[in-house]
Amino acid sequence: MKIYRATAPKINDLVHTKLDVRFDYKKCYMYGKEWVTLKPHMYPTDTLRLDAKGMDIKTIAVVKNGKNIPLKYVYQDSLSLAIQLDKVYHNNESYTIYIDYTSKPNNLKVKGSAAINDAKGLYFINPDGSDKDKPIEVWTQGETESSSAWFPTIDKPNQKCTDEISMTVPAKYVTLSNGRLASQKPNADGTRTDIWKMEQPHSVYLFMMAVGDFKIFHDKWRNKPVDYYLEPKYAPYAKQIFGNTPEMLEFYSKTLGVDYPWNKYAQIVVRDYVSGAMENTTATLHGEQVQKTARELLDSYDDESQIDIAHELFHQWFGDYVTAESWSNITMNESFADFSEMLWAEHKYGKDEADAHSYGAMQSYLRGPVNKTKDLVRFHYDDKEDVFDLVSYQKGGRILNMLKNYLGDEAFFKGLKIYLTKHAYSNGEAQQLRLALEESSGLDLNWYFNQWYYGAGNPALKISHKWDDATKTETVYLEQTQTTGKVFKLPFAIDIYAGGKKERHKVWMNDMADTLSFHVNSKPDLVNVDGDKVLLAEKKEDKTLNEYVFQYFNAPLYLDRFEAITTAALTQSNKDAQKVLIAALKDKYYGLRIKAILALDMTNDDVRNAAQPVLGSLVATDKNTLVQAAAINALGKLKASGNLPLFKQALASQSYAVESAALNAISVTDPAQALPLTKQFEKDASPALTIAIIKIYAAVGTDAEFPTAYELYTHATGQARFGSSRDFATYIGKVQSPANAQKGIAALTDLGIKFKSQPGVANFITMMLQNIKAARAKMNDTASAQAADDALKAFNAAK
């Protein structure tokens, strides 16, 4: 049953937190001393409750005149400290509590969310150094309420305070925390004590520490330090990975009208991170996926890692400077950060990139039926982790985009500035955003917030139109077909293209069915409903192919062209559809060039004959390596030996995507040539090349190549391992050696167990193991078939 979740009451307010910590790498413990200063929020109190998860508590005392006076306390379920204070305190007086404790994060039994897959707060990575391919690190993750796993606190987002963190670490390591590095002192025992001070208040879930062997690249923005912490191997590429950050800081500061509010901005990359990235105040933490070499970055463009860099930076305003007052209002953090991704994409890469990103986000939301049952602001939920979902992120980002389109940029961003300024270093909720936007625009927005923030679902629109030549009238029929009974109020634009001109009409849909009529001098070539392509809706339109052809060549936006390509791909025997697809091979946006390439029906003679020379040109001259790779893949499917020189030439590319596509194309065109060529790339195997090499060895390799495939597979990133698992399983099923087969079965099973909690993994790994079992049984390899059966049982039993 979903429970009403009130904003956490404030009995005591955090004022300042001072920590002195050192780490026991052998036990994976942290020994901490804390001085936490508080004051009653309003009412007098003689008690204090602090969250403290799974700790050993040695001392709790109140500090009086420099002396620690012990206090009585009860440690409830090893989760919460109920402390009896030495007297009744009023809200005009503060007090400081001293706590001596040990944090034991690996002993905690806690769960994470879809966004953050673990919640023990403090993480020791490879602490004994046993994994030679992995650095020794310590780092923290506070969201949602896991900071209280490494220091006692009031672990709620509506509590903010300043802090000072002293870390004593092996002298060879680098440290990072919030705020400024105030001092560093070498100690006689080979350690060093670093003191970090955060002198502006921020929420406790945003406190962070990181310790390890990092190289620091120093950048700057308006004379503020902007630093990048990476593993030494990736340090030479720091500027290429994070180099957009100063430009992002400038862009977001100017767009919001509020300059970046903190003293520095650092980004650090760690191993085995439990999420994509985390917006700790002044010190964002990224997972290892962001670390790439110069060659890997050639294929990145505005990929997930670059999106994360923008997303987490925007949180420094929406999330850190002004923080959601409760997890129910997480939209005030995450919807804004999601929305910021398209703001940056448009600024840096153009409107097509932004629109493509926004459309992809909307489709992610629409694909999940359960998403349509959830309000954006959610006061009822089972667990706080449940709100970190496609509604709070992707749907919320689209709701903000519609609101920006409705109000206009000037009023929208003025309202954001009002919201940020009024609630600086404090907390906010959706109603305060509404009030700020009403103040800037002068418009009532209750209807919008009630519909989109405090309601669920989205409209499903059926759109048709009819031309009456006698009256020169174009009639547009609009129907909302969602079955929830909820009627959406929708402002949008209808663009009518006729006589070589476009005329825009701003309209409202207020009912389940609306009919709109427009006088036009001649029959329209196109009626484009939702001309700005911003509506969060499922749309069905009755446009003809001719209308979509006109739309491709005349309507300006990404989605206009996307819809036309999609429709043209369904009727490739039609000459006009072919014109769209061939033209789209040279579309100004690389994503649509790739879409057109993937859509080509190369079994159609007319399509193939028209497309083949264009594809060859794309391989040779397109500036985008992903387009080049897609073109090579399309040509490879023809299995035409005349293309082999082009593929071999592509093997010299610096792009891993192009190299991988070329190897695959050669392998299907001339398998005998593929095997020796592939061996040349074994030692420089990026994730993309790893997938290609395993695919080729699975198709044409023997037991001789299996050790290399096994080595590549077991040392690949998680994404590359999943990308190659189907081919690796095929290879396991065909090798002659039972020992090789059983090694492969173990590797596949290990991957499955590690990621079993992720959507789709359980079914995928089960199917792979079942296929291997059948293949080994067919080869009369009963030992390996039994190993596969045992692996299935172990996998199914794993938590």
Image: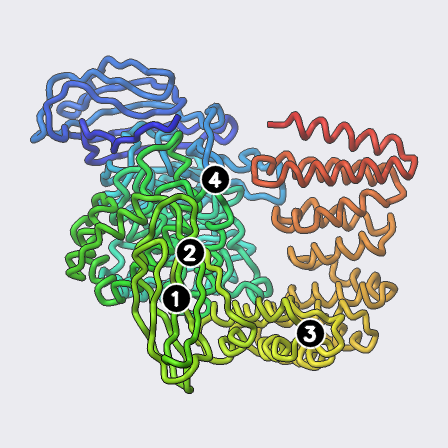
Compared to 79, does 205 lie above or below? below
Which residue was labeled with disc 2?
A: 537
Mark 2 or mark 1: name the one nearer the start of the chain.
Answer: 1
Q: Which mark is residue 530?
A: 1
Q: Are marks 3 and 4 in contact (CB under 8 Å)?
A: no
Q: Position of residue 132 (x, y in %)?
A: 63, 42
Image quarter (top left, top right, bottom left or bottom right) of the C terminus: top right
Compared to 479, does 670 lie above or below? below
Q: Which mark is residue 114?
A: 4
Front residue (pair 7, 465): 465
Residue under the image location 31 percent in, 38 percent down = 328
Which amino acid type is marked by label 2? Answer: Ala
Residue under the image location 79 percent in, 57 percent down = 696
Q: Are marks 3 and 1 in contact (CB under 8 Å)?
A: no
Q: Are marks 2 and 1 in contact (CB under 8 Å)?
A: yes
Q: Residues within 10 Å of mark 1 (few under 14, many from 20)?
A: some
Q: Position of residue 238 (x, y in %)?
A: 48, 60
Mark 2 or mark 4: name the one nearer the start of the chain.
Answer: 4
